[in-house]
């Protein structure tokens, strides 16, 4: 049976060369194995996502000849599912409410003598863990995953396989007690990504190497949900002429801009 892959962009801008490479990698992996290439629109960030960018994703993929199978899945249409997934985790006893602000978390980490260097992720020190905060009594809070309890519930070492790195032992604590949802902003990328891959039947996840660390926590969520474990392929990133990762704010390398300059599809693929 062929691989089922997916391309899952966020509609916060036009697709650039890096997106095109990611989509092409997923498409090629699926088609070379006789499988399916799915499209998912990760539009849960209502403050930044725009309908015109969704249309732009469709336009660019069609122009590149990367035709997806079936109907695109828009995450904004499945919020009720994510709420059910979150409730299932809450009933397992692996979530707790957190009322800390980002500034408070950074201050607490600094006091502990572990202030991060520039660009590093601040790992939550567990300030609200064990406080038994009543979520109905506070205005704003986040639901955090209690990594210690979740790991104990998993009850065993967990592994995942990466096409380029081989068999990897999952490090559940790589981000600390991560946020899975906020009262005012719905659910997080981690929960939605794992849930959608499961429900869409994705068997091979291709994505950039910048998301490799996320796979450690995704493996734990898969175990908590009882979801199957896909194979992974964390591919290289496309950089600009200065070696920096491409960003949506760099309009000169969007597929639309390159197309308007007269480049054809073969020219785009040669830039990979």
Image (cartoon, rainbow, N blue to C red):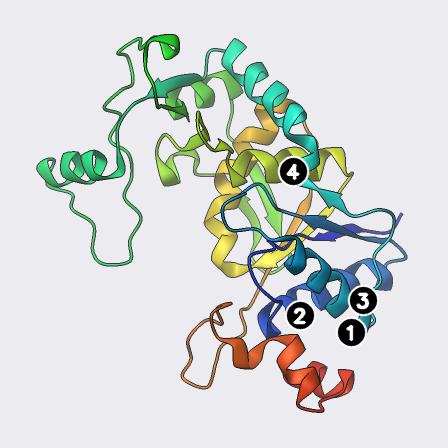
Task: Please give the label number shown on residue 76.
Answer: 4
Question: Where is the C terminus found, in terms of image quarters?
Answer: bottom right
Q: Depth-wise, is mark 4 or mark 1 nearer the camera?
A: 4
Q: Determine whether the residue tagged by mark 2 lies in a helix, strand or loop.
A: helix
Q: Determine whether the residue tagged by mark 3 lies in a helix, strand or loop.
A: loop
Q: Determine whether the residue tagged by mark 1 lies in a helix, strand or loop.
A: helix
Q: Mark 2 touching mark 3, by CB under 8 A?
A: no
Residue at x 47% of width, y 70% of height: 249
Q: Is residue 130 visible?
A: yes
* Residue 165, percent from left and from top: 56, 57
- Marks 2 and 1, Cα distance to the nearest angstrom? 8 Å
- Marks 3 and 1, Cα distance to the nearest angstrom? 5 Å
Extreme residue in the bottom direction:
262
Compared to 271, does 79 lie above or below?
A: above
Disc 2 marks which residue?
20
Disc 3 marks which residue?
66
* Residue 196, percent from left and from top: 68, 37
Name the N-terminal-most of marks 4 and 3.
3
- Marks 4 and 3, Cα distance to the nearest angstrom? 23 Å
Disc 1 marks which residue?
64
Where residue 52 sits, quadrant-wise, is bottom right
Q: Determine whether the residue tagged by mark 4 lies in a helix, strand or loop.
A: helix
- Marks 4 and 1, Cα distance to the nearest angstrom? 26 Å
Closer-to-camera residue (54/62): 54
- Marks 4 and 2, Cα distance to the nearest angstrom? 23 Å
Q: Mark 3 touching mark 1, by CB under 8 A?
A: yes
Q: Residues within 10 Å of mark 4 (few under 14, many from 20)?
A: some
Q: Mark 4 touching mark 3, by CB under 8 A?
A: no
Name the N-terminal-most of marks 2 and 3.
2
């Amino acid at each position: 049976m062929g691989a089922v892959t997916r391309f899952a962009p966020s509609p916060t801008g036009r697709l650039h060369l890096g997106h095109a490479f990611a989509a092409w990698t997923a498409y090629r992996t699926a088609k070379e194995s006789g499988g399916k290439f799915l499209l998912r629109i990760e539009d849960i960030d209502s403050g930044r996502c725009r309908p015109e960018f969704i249309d732009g994703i469709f336009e660019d993929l069609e122009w590149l000849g990367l035709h997806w199978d079936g109907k695109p899945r828009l995450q904004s249409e499945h919020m009720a599912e994510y709420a059910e997934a979150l409730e299932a985790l809450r009933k397992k006893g692996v979530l707790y409410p957190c009322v800390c602000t980002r500034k408070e978390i950074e201050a607490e980490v600094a006091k502990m003598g572990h202030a991060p260097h520039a660009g590093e992720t601040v790992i939550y020190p567990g300030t609200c863990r064990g406080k038994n905060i009543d979520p109905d009594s506070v205005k704003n809070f986040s639901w955090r995953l209690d990594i210690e309890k979740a790991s104990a519930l998993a009850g065993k070492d967990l592994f995942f396989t990466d096409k380029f790195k081989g068999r990897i032992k999952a490090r559940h604590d790589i981000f600390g007690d991560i946020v899975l949802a906020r009262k005012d902003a719905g659910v997080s990328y981690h929960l939605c990504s794992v849930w959608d891959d499961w429900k869409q039947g994705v068997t091979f996840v291709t994505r950039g190497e910048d998301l490799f660390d996320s796979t450690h926590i995704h493996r734990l969520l898969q175990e908590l949900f009882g979801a199957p474990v896909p194979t992974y392929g964390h591919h290289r990133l496309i950089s600009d002429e200065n070696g920096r990762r491409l960003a949506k704010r760099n309009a000169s390398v969007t597929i639309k801009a390159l197309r308007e300059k007269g480049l054809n599809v073969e020219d785009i693929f040669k830039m990979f």
